Image (tube, rainbow, N blue to C red):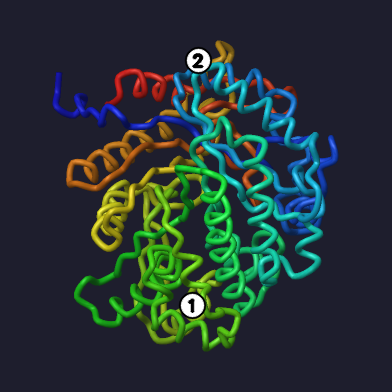
Amino acid sequence: MSARSELRFPETFVWGAATAAYQIEGAAREDGRGPSIWDIFSRTPGKVFQGHTGDVACDHYHRYADDVALMAELGLRTYRFSIAWPRIQPDGTGPVNPRGLDFYDRLVDALLSRGIDPFVTLYHWDLPQALQDRGGWTNRETAEHFADYAVAVHGRLGDRVRTWTTLNEPWCSAYLGYGNGVHAPGEQDAGAAFRAVHHLLLGHGLATRALRAVGVATLGITLNPADVQPADAGSEADAAAVRLVDGLQNRIFLDPLTGAGYPDDVLAQVARHVEPTFVRGGDEKIIAAPIDLLGVNYYSPTYVAGRVGGAGGSAYPGTAGVVEFLPPVGPLTEMGWSIEPAGLTRLLERIGVDYPGLPLMITENGGAFPDKTGAEDPDATGRVADTDRVAYLDGHLRAVHRAIARGVDVRGYLVWSLLDNFEWAEGYRKRFGIVHVDYLTQRRTPKESARWYQEVISRNGL
């Protein structure tokens, strides 16, 4: 047997899969759920591919028991899912909706009955629309309401859920939702994006404090940090471009979360768009509430060049005219993202060096691939031969293993995603799941990647 097939992960390594509420649950108007910003955004003409919505999605709200049985069949040890805030507090504040909590009660019990550890994400982008009507994440009060909501969810599930994360990818919520408008709520204002960044982090800190007070032992946050690389390693202009982009995507979150406060160069960049008066005395101390786990979502690296007149990136305020984002090079996923597992190793090593002592977990990693030769639709035998996805996952797991071998504290890997689902602005045309979903019949079919992953989990390695 070759050495390539003998990689083993630590005995305590956690294997699982991840999903998000709006992407899979459906039941958008059932049992007292209020509207979220994604319900409204997806109904806005031109915002989501072919006007797709999450009204039905994968109908997980009704089919969760079968989905949990499928997770158990695949050998998942952990299932990361998000709570839909509008199910718990339809208006974002006030009394909780018991029927919304009942669903997650049933889901958690079903997971535990199958030996699967529930891993809760409190916010995965589906802000109650009533809060958005009052400014959303640009309004400081939303951070305070988030902490109240977190405690309400813990009050029902805290006796059985051990691992909690506050936010998923606040970079996306802030920059894509309020900066360039490609995600809900669809605003286009750099100043609003920076206000949202701060209030998201403040909400994380307030929720973390509140959850600690009620006894939560394992708390974290999930980011989508970027492996930012220069087009030319010897170019000073490219190095400056890397630092600018790294500041806007990585250090603006990681530094305050780990107690260093906002970096001076990032605050200077913010001040070019809005006076950071929304950062009040004591806020950075709240944001730096100690965490036990940093979730890392990784899909592709980012290459930049420092270039006068560069197009910049719409999701990176202040990069226009000075930064050029290099187009991805093959091979690519169907999202047009380059496949470079080495970028994940570099990213994990960088976090391990710059932010030591912070345990990491891969909370999302996966690929969307096109429908070719039956690769996404079951053939007559029910087979879904997604060999591209298997190769993608294999390469990235080897990248994680390399980081661990080099001393990085990575505790687990959660594949994105368990199911094909509503892929935000892309609607249902991009499939990330290791399980195929026929959206007309809701039939689930494990793909070859699911069976491959099942074997990886069984042997704890490759």
Q: Residues within 10 Å of mark 2 (few under 14, many from 20)?
A: few
In the picture shown, does residue 290 fall above or below 428?
below
Disc 2 from disc 1: Cα separation: 48 Å
The crowd level at tag 1 (other Cα within 10 Å; few <14, some 14-19, many 20+) is some
Q: Residue at x 45, y 36 (%)?
A: 415
Q: Residue sitting at 59 percent across and 34 percent down?
A: 420
User: In the image, is residue 364 above or below residue 209?
Assistant: above
In the displayed structure, 350 sits above or below 85; it is: below
- The amino acid marked with disc number 1 is Ala
* Badge number at residue 73: 2
Residue occupying image coordinates x 14% and y 23%? 2
Compared across the picture, whether 88 is left or right of 406 comes to: right
Give x and y (percent) for residue 283. 53, 73
Q: Position of residue 281 (x, y in %)?
A: 53, 80
The residue that appears at 57% across and 75% down in the rendered structure is 194
Q: Which SS class for mark 2?
A: helix
- The residue that mark 1 highlights is 311
Residue 281 relative to residue 91: left or right: left
Q: Position of residue 460 (x, y in %)?
A: 30, 24
**Residue type pointed to by label 2:** Glu
